[in-house]
Image (tube, helix red, strand yellow):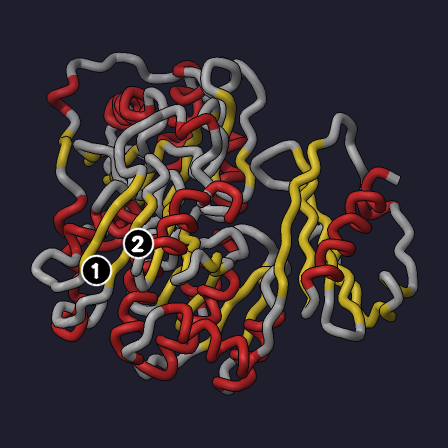
Amino acid sequence: MQPETKIKFGTDGWRAVIGEDYTFANVKIVSQATSDLLGPGKKIAVGYDTRFMSDIFAEVASRVFKNNGIDVILSDKPVPTPVVSFTVKSRRLDAGIMITASHNPPQYNGFKIKTSSGGAAGPEITGKVEELLGKTPVKENYEGRAQITEEDLIGDYAKFIRGYIDFPRIRKKVFRVLVDAMHGSGDSYIATILKGSKIKLEFIRNTINPYFEGKGPEPVEQNLAQLKQRLKKERFDLGIALDGDADRIAAVAPGGVFIHPQKILGLLALHLSQDKKYKGGVVKTVVGSTMIDHIAKFLNVELYETPVGFKYISGLMETKDIIAGGEEAGGMGVKGYIPERDGIMAGLLLLEMMVYRNKNILKILNEAEKQFGRYYYLREDLHLNKQVDLASKDLPEELLGKKITQVKREDGIKVICEDESWLVLRASGTEPIIRIYSESKSLIRSRKLIEYGKNFVNG
């Protein structure tokens, strides 16, 4: 049997449009290929988010696994992706499957594979799954849903997070926190973890809406108008936004100030090192902020740089001593947990940092930027109707009047200038677009770099 259409894993799983490429037939084919790679007798956890028919796609995948002699623990409700990762690691399972398209537009769904460590499956695994697509007929002899174990996966996860953070210290504080779940599977689980504390929690968009108000549930500034407005008008100390499967985070400070995920990574590194006394290096991606470089140097810890995609950070977290690793899109991983990102954990650690320092997040951010520099980080997605070969384009010797001092090609093209400003052009691993990133110490220059990048791609 051959796949109904081309199935290709990107930077984080396979994603496609529901009803076009993302069909029951293709989900069965991918599940069969994954089963062939795992082999009978293995144990896996399967979870799903709040997208259209995610629960049914999860059940269909579970049937295929079960029919291949694999024991399946299926979540009894929508859960964050890190809950599946945690379940795999804590129960010593062989793998995890999450039905989610994360932050993609509502017409998408996806299929993520987690390894036995709870980390994201790398190219060596997803490549093998792709090779096995259609090689074995899908095993359809399902004898009833009762053969699949459905369980509440949230309880153990919440218990662990509650123990990881300094709950006895947090529970006495009276900070006000507003959480935007963006209609995703993060729901109001932060309240479960903080139950019994004096933290005053409020939630917005914590109801299921598979349409996600017509936008992808991505925690970028333009999607967080309601969160920013309430932080501007009301007396909250911190605003947290989670993406569709709650493995990514953005934050808003009092006054409606958007805190870019790159700054969150820097704050987490400072908190874990200075307040919690953790030892280890820091990981950023090739499009990570220069602020992270300065923080790592100040902390006297090693800084690692990877291509875009948390699976690369996951790999380092499994082989190196890392206190925090993060990507530009808001995925944060921390030491002593799973080698995977978790927006809920990151948000609670920001709260914990506020508790340790007895300051709201805006005061903490201002102090960090005063010490390590204020950088303006921008990203724009360029949708194209034709293929563009970035590697074939000639690069100038200077960029908007500043000499180019370094060019990196590990993931797209990164051009670094003498004033620390930089521009990155790279193809997305999950969508048919070119992503353009820029950063500098001037918002005007960062905007001009974005425009330069757009003209460079189209030229």
- Residue 161: assigned label: 1
Percent across and percent down for residue 334 are 36, 65
The quadrant in which the C terminus is found is: top right
- Which is more toward the observer, 257 or 414? 257
Instruction: Determine the CA span between mark 1 and mark 2.
Output: 9 Å
- Which is more toward the observer, 246 or 304? 246
Judge whether 268 appears above or below 79 on screen: below
The residue depicted at 48 percent of the width and 57 percent of the height is 258
Percent across and percent down for residue 83 are 26, 47
- Give the structural element (helix, strand or loop) at label 2: helix
- Which is more toward the observer, 265 or 389? 265
The residue depicted at 52 percent of the width and 86 percent of the height is 298
- Residue 344: assigned label: 2
Q: Earlier in the sequence, mark 1 or mark 2?
A: 1
**Callout 1 crowding tier (Cα within 10 Å): few <14, some 14–19, many ≥20:** some
**CB atoms at circles 1 and 2 under 8 Å apart?**
yes
Judge whether 354 appears above or below 428 on screen: below
Mark 1 vs mark 2: give the one in front.
Answer: 2
Q: Quadrant of residue 370?
A: bottom right
The residue depicted at 67 percent of the width and 36 percent of the height is 433
The residue depicted at 52 percent of the width and 43 percent of the height is 222
Percent across and percent down for residue 76 are 17, 32
Q: Amino acid at mark 1?
A: Ile
Q: Amino acid at mark 2?
A: Ile
Residue 341, visible in the rendered structure: no
